[in-house]
Image (spheres, rainbow, N blue to C red):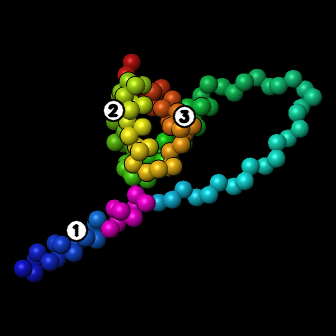
Amino acid sequence: MRVRSVVLCVLSVMLLAFAVGCAKQEPPKPAAPAAPAAPAVAPAAPAPAAAPAADGKALFEQKCSVCHGLDRATARAESKEKWAEIIKAMQGKKADWISDVDAAMILGYLAAEHGKK
């Protein structure tokens, strides 16, 4: 009987810790600075293609690691369509945690780095 109550207490604490860990809130974003005046010089060359993938990776690490380890996702290779399904399912788990813009960037990263060839 005593063992049962100890086990129940331990499981309760673990469940509480899990619930608190998945309920983290994203810190508020600072206000965007005013847009600078248009430059008089011709625009610079476009950013390299690796920049969106780097942004997608950063978002993936920030958003997805809150609820589970990153190795869970990066250990598999899926088609772009399957990654889109998975990301959509994760968006549904916590409202407003992963915006559609963030989801698109994460999808680009996962499809490029962990997509089926």
Say which residue appears at 53% left-offset and 38% top-offset: 100
The stretch in magenta equals 16-23
Quadrant for the C terminus, please.
top left
> Is 77 left, or right, of 50 in this rendering?
left
Label 1, label 3: how far apart the Cα atoms are: 37 Å
Q: Residues within 10 Å of mark 1 (few under 14, many from 20)?
A: few
Say which residue appears at 87% left-offset and 23% top-offset: 42
Point out which mark residue 87 bears.
Answer: none
Label 1, label 2: how far apart the Cα atoms are: 30 Å
State whether residue 49 appears in this view. yes
Q: What's the amino acid at mark 1?
A: Leu
Front-lying residue, 85 or 4: 85
Label 3, label 2: how far apart the Cα atoms are: 18 Å
Work out which residue is located at the far bottom of the displayed protein and give it. 2
Does residue 28 sit above or below 96 in this rendering?
below
Instruction: Find residue 23 and report its image quarter.
Output: bottom left
Q: What's the amino acid at mark 2?
A: Arg
Majority secondary structure of magenta residues: helix
> Is 57 left, or right, of 79 in this rendering?
right
Of tags 1 and 2, the one toward the viewer is 1
Of tags 3 and 2, the one toward the viewer is 3
Say which residue label 2 marks. 76
Say which residue appears at 25% left-offset and 70% top-offset: 12
Say which residue appears at 69% left-offset and 55% top-offset: 30
Q: Residues within 10 Å of mark 3 (few under 14, many from 20)?
A: many
- Circle 1 sits in a helix, a strand or a loop, which is it? helix
Whether residue 22 appears in magenta in the rendering, the answer is: yes
Say which residue label 1 marks. 11
**What is the x, y in percent for residue 8?**
18, 72
Say which residue label 3 marks. 105
Front-lying residue, 3 or 104: 104
